[in-house]
Image (cartoon, rainbow, N blue to C red):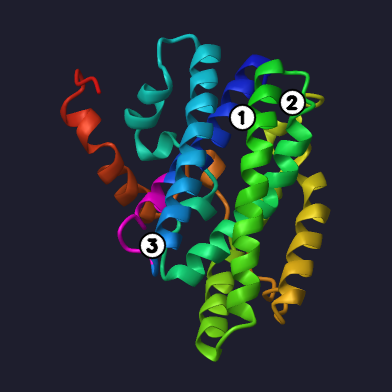
Amino acid sequence: MHRGEATFRYALRLGDDALVLGQRLGEWCGKAPALEIDLALANLGLDLIGQATFLLGYAGEIEGKGRDADRLAFHRDVMDFSNCLLVEQPNGDFARTIARQFLFSAWRAPLFEALSTSSDETLAAVAKKAVKETAYHLRYSREWVVRLGDGTDESRRRLVEGLEWCWRFVDELFEPDEVTRALANIAPDPAALRPRFDAEVDKTLGEAGLDQPAARRAVVGGRAGRHSEHLGHLLAEMQFLPRAYPEARW
């Protein structure tokens, strides 16, 4: 795989991650346990949508087929998305949403730190901005993991269940493939990010009085377009208006 194709696919997958998780967090609007949480989750979602806009826009520029960020977001079918499986999982209760956000942010933070020194100037610029946002996402979700884990019996139980639900999707985040292998010196080796992730998870769960979930058979395939049924339902809602009114302008 040549580097141009690999860079297109890499920017696309990072943009898809942010887009899908931003949409998931948006589903909490008006439904969160408290107004403060409602606003916080909406802000996290907006940060992710902003990252998706830049990354998908860059992917479109590299592709050179006239597809901008909106076209890539709203006019691709489910098997054309390359997001990781973790982000498309249903919100569940608040504890599961926090578990998903924490695991995603604990991976995304060292990824963007490494990517901020990329030889690809556009990816590096996006990463430098996203580093600050992702650090906040990690801090926010980390504090809630500790609060829920060290809270009541019910909050602890719900968090444990949320972590166990999400844990099977973690290994996919660190799998090298033909895209990342083609981008040496442009993108970090996914496997090299695992120690930072494990250290963050162990430290946070230790403060929450929890153990790391037991190892489970990894569920993978999102990067290759093999998704759960959950993504199809999410896209049906997210893409309805642009597909029904393709000439509409906001």
Q: Nearer the viewer, residue 208 or 74?
A: 208
Of circles 3 and 2, the one toward us is 3
In the rendered image, which quarter contains the N terminus?
A: top right
Give the mark nearest the N terminus, 1 or 2: 1
Mark 2 closeness class: few <14, some 14–19, many ≥20 residues within 10 Å: many
Q: Are marks 3 and 1 in contact (CB under 8 Å)?
A: no
Picture residue at 59% right of the left edge, 68% below the top: 144
Q: Quadrant of residue 30?
A: bottom left
Mark 2 or mark 3, which is nearer the start of the sequence?
3
Q: Position of residue 149 (x, y in %)?
A: 62, 79
Label 1 is placed on what type of residue? Tyr
In the rendered image, the quadrant that contains the C terminus is: top left
Q: Badge 1: few (under 14), some or many (20 or more) residues near its Cα, within 10 Å?
A: many
- Report the residue marked by disc 3: 35
Q: Image point 71% across, 16% down: which residue?
A: 121
Report the front residue among 222 and 129.
129
Q: Position of residue 64 (x, y in %)?
A: 49, 9
Q: Which residue is mark 1?
A: 10
* Secondary element at tag 2: loop
Rendered view: 79 above or below 148: above
Residue located 49% across and 37% down the image: 16
Number of numbered discs: 3
Do tag 1 and tag 2 residues touch (Cβ < 8 Å)? yes
- The residue beneath circle 2 is 183
Relative horizontal placement of residue 30, taking residue 62 as reference (left or right): left
> Which stretch did the figure color magenta?
23-32
Please report contact status of discs 3 and 2: CB closer than 8 Å, yes or no.
no
Q: How many angstroms separate mark 3 from mark 1 (CA)?
A: 36 Å
Judged left or right of residue 53, residue 6 is right
